[in-house]
Image (tube, grey):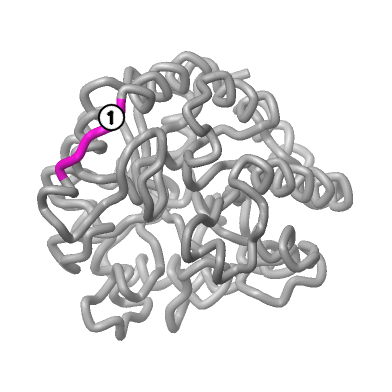
Amino acid sequence: MMKPMNIFDLHCDTLMPIYIDGHTLQNWTGHINLEKLQKGGCMVQCFAIYIPTNRSAEYHNVKEGPYEYWKGCVNAFDKEMAANADVIRQVRCMADIEKNVKEGKMSAPLTIENGVALDGKIERVQEFYDRGARMIGLTWNYENSVGFPCSDDPELHKLGLKPFGLEVVAKMDELGMVIDTSHLSEGGFWDVVKHSKNPFMASHSCARALCDHRRNLTDEQMRALARKGGVAQVTFYEGFLRKDGKADILDAITHLKHMAKVMGVEHIGIGTDFDGDGGVPGIASASEVINLTRMLLKNGFSEADLQLIWGGNFLRVMNEIQNFKS
């Protein structure tokens, strides 16, 4: 009999409909709610505060500035954790996760997608940490005070972190916050490799060798990430899995196999991007992640491999980042 998997998902955008539209983890009908997390066997679900700007803010009718939006999202997250503490609880360190496992509760680390809310103010890294954020995606699709996004323009893609971005990397290392390079320019990625003292992650990116998209990682980047002890999380966005966008669960497996070959299975994981752009046939919601487990076992992965992919690698990184332990 297959052993239970410790299902860890490193990225979802579920807090957006909760904050903007007033949904809850009980009644939201999208990719992730409490019932679907439980059905899928989730142990740890990272909830990202995705901070929309520019055209995305207009599309979502967000009138607040990035910092005000971040505060509103944190308050909404806190409210959901308080309302559902019998099922899921926020975690700020390894000890919190271990406590939740013993008590049969799911764990919810808070993360941030887009460092735009830092706005050149280094003290906000500490503020975000104090409010519970344990990972920050340095950029999204637009330039901010930290650095530049990935780009189809080779020259723009080479742009590195700004001086303030290097300050942010140092402060995050000091606090024990995970640096997330998904969406970041390749030049910025190499600056993180050079300057970060801790392992880092790409919370929702796939393999560029299989799908030539600016958001995906080259084999060279993946090897560098592995040398730093980090983890790249395969995401379920069809446009990152296949150039023609006609992806399904088998394409996610193909990316995982390639990345395991390049990096080692000790450096791969899953960041679904559910309630964002994630979800393809076969793994269309949190309740269906068990399908990926079954299919991986049929495609050359062992149960020990899956234990690493579905959480073991994340836990290793957390244990290596000293300040996350307790």
Q: Tell me if 72 is positioned left or right of 43 in this view.
A: right
Residue 193 can be seen, yes or no: yes
Along the line of sight, the residue nearer the viewer: 134 or 315: 134
Start-end of magenta stretch? 158-162
Mark 1 = which residue? 192
Where residue 149 appears, as percent x and y from the top left, is 31, 49
Residue depicted at x 47% and y 27%: 120
Where residue 239 appears, as percent x and y from the top left, is 31, 74
| Quarter of image, res 162 | top left
Relative to 134, residue 250 above or below? below
Label 1 SS: helix
Residue depicted at x 61% and y 72%: 31
Q: Amino acid at mark 1?
A: Val
For the C terminus, the quadrant is top right
Q: Tell me if 312 is positioned left or right of 264 in this view.
A: right
Q: Main secondary structure of the magenta part?
A: loop
Relative to 85, residue 289 above or below? below
